[in-house]
Amino acid sequence: MANEEQLNRTLGNVPGAGAVYSLIDFIDGWARKYSIWPIHLVTGCCSPEFMQVCGSRFDMERLGILPFASVRQCDCIMVVGIVSRKMADRVKYLYEQMGEPKYVVAVGACPTGKGPFYDSYSVVAIDEYVPVDVYIPGCPPRPEAIIHGMMQLQEKIVKERRLGVKE
Ligand code: SF4
């Protein structure tokens, strides 16, 4: 962020800089939109739906969404299924290790709002621990709903203006 502010201060008054920034923003957004790498993190019984969207029938990879094993290369956490208080600390720990920009998608009624375990002493809604960008309801959500939720995240990414330059 500091570098972006410095860049804005340095080049903000240069004629045509706004157009250049807009172009960079567009390319940056387009590239990030089609290269979301969610970390493998399946915490509950929504997992078969996650397997479905990763498999050949629904094929999330055709949208550029590729689950990946190393948190340091990932830019997204799909919290798939029920999260206990104990596990939520681990989710937060993983989230903090990821580089910016990073996104969180709550998949299923449990991480969205505790689902059927709303009165449990140990189940938490994941937005109590990390900021959530997209909520996908359902118990479990169908693969189509997960794909739709990830497309909503793509729309959000492409609308971001990372350089924050005025036209
Ligand atoms: S939302 Fe339903 S299917 Fe998903 S983890 Fe919770 S109880 Fe299981």
Image: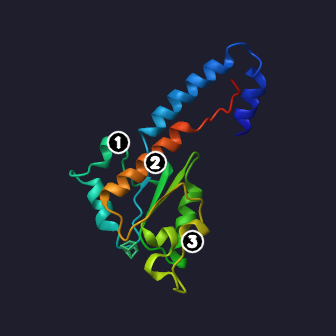
Identify the residue at horizontal 59%, vertical 46% (top origin): 100
Label ID, residue 103? none
Nearer the observer, 55 or 159: 159
Label ID, residue 63? 1
Give the amino acid at mark 1: Leu
The answer to the question of whether label 2 and label 3 lie on touching residues, with beta carbons closer than 8 A, is: no
Label ID, residue 89? 3
Q: Position of residue 55 (x, y in %)?
A: 24, 54
Q: Position of residue 41 (x, y in %)?
A: 42, 63
Where 43 sits versus 151, above or below?
below
The residue indicated by pointer 2 is 152
Tell me the quadrant of the picture where the N terminus can be found: top right
Question: Mark 2: few, some, or many residues within 10 Å (few <14, many ≥20)?
Answer: some
Q: Quadrant of ligand 1?
A: bottom left
Where 116 sits versus 165, above or below?
below
Residue 130 is left or right of residue 145, and the answer is right
Nearer the observer, 113 or 67: 113
Q: Position of residue 10 (x, y in %)?
A: 77, 23
